[in-house]
Amino acid sequence: MSSGGCAVTWWGHASTSVELDGVVVATDPLLSRRLFHLHRASEAPPTQATTADLVLVSHLHHDHLHLASLDRFAPDVPVVVPRGAPRAVPALLGRNLVEVAPGDRVEVAGITLQVLGATHDGRRDALSRRSVGVPAVGFRLASGTTSVWYPGDTGLRDDFADVDPVDLALVPIGGWGPSLGHEHLDPEEAATALDRVGARWALAVHYGTFWPVGLRRLHPATHRHFFLTPPERFAAAVARLADAGRAVPRVLTPGFAERVCPT
């Protein structure tokens, strides 16, 4: 890979491996076939998905902070978590943790991280008192002249416009269930968010991976709308921005293949 380039592999849901100047960064690894009542629509990712120099965890929800998946990474790999995460999830203790909050700017494993705010419930779950006050976060990653935006789970925010443009945007466009709510981006909102930030390349994530067992058979139209159609709706929304004269990125073909962002 040429200096200043990047590569990304999507492993499903919000899990990716991003390579920046030779440093591999894993985002929100969820590498199992099942999560509670959710079933993965494809095979679990291969061992390659557990190779990283740095792991980023955007918030404490079980589909983003998945302890069994974290256990598959080398124990000395730094894991960046929202501030207060070890208090809320004591099983994290003993790992090589870096706690951050919105507004922080830190350098870890050769990557400069700008920690961003996110409009999302940061608690482990609705009944977790220990995780009250733990924020959900997003990230802008940079190494050399190459940069990546990964907002984690969030609703649409005005301050996306304050994030410096990036080479690659990892944009969440859906979810795992039959609704999204205001704390997630749907495909059209994801295109708006992307327009506010600005990127040369974009890869849609956080869709089409996990689905509640039985709902595909019981609610096929809902399954199609929230599980199957988000990538085409996202690409169409980005195309409409281009038709309106906006500068938009090239949308990478969804899938589990590695795509390279050239310099």
Image (spheres, helix red, strand yellow):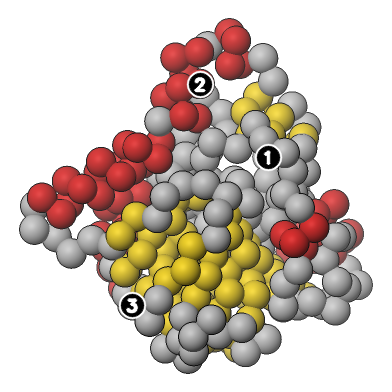
Q: CA distance from mark 3 to mark 1?
A: 33 Å
Q: Viewer-nearest of labels 3 and 2? A: 2
Q: Which residue is mark 3?
A: 164
Q: Earlier in the sequence, mark 3 or mark 2?
A: 3
Q: Residue furthest top?
A: 218
Q: In the drawing, does residue 40 fall left or right of residue 231? A: right
Q: Which residue is mark 1?
A: 126
Q: In the drawing, does residue 248 fall left or right of residue 84? A: left
Which mark is drawn over residue 223? 2
Q: In the drawing, does residue 114 fall left or right of residue 229? A: right
Which mark is drawn over residue 139? none
- Does dot 2 land on a helix, a strand or a loop? helix
The kind of residue on which mark 3 rests is: Asp
Q: Is there CB contact under 8 Å for labels 1 and 2?
A: no
**Residue 123, visible in the rendered structure:** no
Q: CA distance from mark 1 to mark 2?
A: 25 Å
Work out whether 16 lies above or below 200: above
- Does dot 3 land on a helix, a strand or a loop? loop
- Does dot 1 land on a helix, a strand or a loop? loop
Q: Viewer-nearest of labels 1 and 2? A: 2
- Which residue lies at the image location 61% right of the left edge and 16% below the top edge? 215
**Mark 3 surroundings: few (<14), some (14-19) or many (≥20) residues within 10 A:** some
Work out whether 11 lies above or below 79: above
